[in-house]
Image: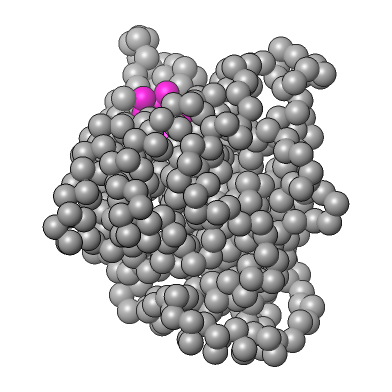
Amino acid sequence: MLEVSAALTQGQITPTELCQKRLSLIKKTKFLNAYITVSEEEAFKQAEESERRSKNEQSLGDFDGIPTAVKDNFSTSGIETACASNMLKGYIPPSNATVVQKLLDQGALLMGKTNLDEFAMGSRSTDGVYSKQYREKRKQNPHSKNEDLDWLMTGGSLGGTAVAMSAFTCYVALGSATGGSTRNPAAHCRLVGFKPSYGLVSHHGLIPLVNLMDVPGILTRCVDDAAVVLSVLAGHDTNDCTTVQDPINPFIWFGRCEQTITVFLVQIEGAKVIEVSIPHTSYSIVCYHVLCMSEVALNIARLDGLQYGHRCDIDVSTQSMYASTRQEVFNDVVRGRILSGNFFLLKENWENYFIKAQKVQRLIANDFANAFNSGVDVLLTPTILSEAVPYLEFIKGDNRTQTVNMAGLPAVSIPAARPNQGLPVGLQLTGHAFCDQQLLTVAKWFEKQVQFPVIQLQELMDDFSSMITHSTKLASNTLKKPKKF
Ligand code: GLN
């Protein structure tokens, strides 16, 4: 992103040319199913404004003219926001989510809204209404040996966003990070996926999944870009009382100040590696789901067809209208979570499930605190259990990520490669709460060591569609299995 920004500043390309190229690439890669809505008109208008500023030497900075994409669960003023659900089909929010507004205020171009699992519930990105075609094909022919089996899961729930980035249709993207939705797809798609500390970035305007864990996630191609995005997004928001008033360490990124980064890196060179135990991790996934489903039941309660959302034609009674509406629009995952959540919240179950899960959540947070108190600055784990796999081999992908969300800590997945394997995997680094800057500094050090193949600036500008094999047979957020590199 920073390289593209420099190219814009130096006049190697104009914002409107760049926007035009990205829009044509979005059209050519439509079969990847990355975007739910392409905001062509808005993006072009924003590009023209950016061009005007640039001509008048009034550039707003690094983001001015940069194509960005936003997961379809962030409210965008005047642009449909449906969370890949028929329940919200046609819903046009009256205002932008705080993070979206912050990027637009910096001159970013909004290329569109990207595909996800319905209401961000899932870890494959095949569970949204816009991935139906793909799921149906699988159901009809689960063991077929045809080309479909070569296609791999991006992970989720922000698979569409990861694909939009991987296909170079944008240079920065925002997703939600509740249990791993940013880091998992980042790990599969050789991107940097960053989940900031809970409370550092506003989630106002992000349609909630689990309020106590939802954080806007940042998807970029390198750590520097993630840090620069965070420096714009971080800060208190009067619309979100969970954002900290006075962060322990206000976020300032020194990444591009070579002297400062060198000092940090020298400190890291002297680092010691020790093993630590986070003993309650094994309870984490169960605990996450009890908390998640309970909050889902509450959050989705408002989408009843009366106050908000789609309403079915049945009008014999309010009860049957509710039931039929929900049957009609929600997928099995969403309905299952509503049902389980309501069960956990029943008066007779509340203590046994919800309260117990909260206690386990506290134990997990304490595990991290103990590890950090023993002198550890950053924890290193794999982000995912395997590289991207085909649909049938996919196992839930967030086993390594959601513990961090339960403790509210910052974590980042950076690309790494396994020897002799063709696909990227991710290394996950977790930091102390509100030490996002330290975390990203270590991530940058790793990035330098790993030296994952970098795409050159010219390639960033060019039309990448020739590198992506076209297939009309596929319609999902999937990656084509690459040749070994
Ligand atoms: N896979 C997790 C879930 O379905 C994470 C989702 C997310 O982070 N949005 O709840």
The quadrant of the image that shows the N terminus is bottom left
Magenta stretch in the rendered image: 83-89
Residue 236 at least partly seen: yes
Compared to residue 252, the image places residue 323 above or below, namely: above
Please identify the residue farthest to the right as the structure is shown: 420
The stretch drawn in magenta includes residue 85 = yes
Q: Position of residue 330 (x, y in %)?
A: 49, 25
Compared to residue 13, the image places residue 60 above or below, namely: below
Residue appearing at x 48%, y 26% in the figure = 28
Please identify the residue farthest to the left as the structure is shown: 56
Q: Position of residue 79 (x, y in %)?
A: 28, 34
Residue appearing at x 80%, y 56% in the figure = 418
Q: Position of residue 238 (x, y in %)?
A: 24, 64
Of residue 166 and residue 203, the one placed in the foreground of this image is: 166
Residue appearing at x 32%, y 40% in the figure = 17
Compared to residue 195, the image places residue 266 above or below, namely: below
Indicate left or right for 411 with 245 as reference. right
Residue appearing at x 64%, y 42% in the figure = 155
> How many discs appear?
0
Asked which quadrant contains residue 325, the reply is: top left
Q: What's the coloring here?
A: one colour
Residue 300 at least partly seen: no
Q: Position of residue 480 (x, y in %)?
A: 68, 33
Of residue 373 and residue 344, the one placed in the foreground of this image is: 373
Of residue 99 and residue 482, the one placed in the foreground of this image is: 482
Of residue 459 and residue 183, the one placed in the foreground of this image is: 459
The stretch drawn in magenta includes residue 269 = no
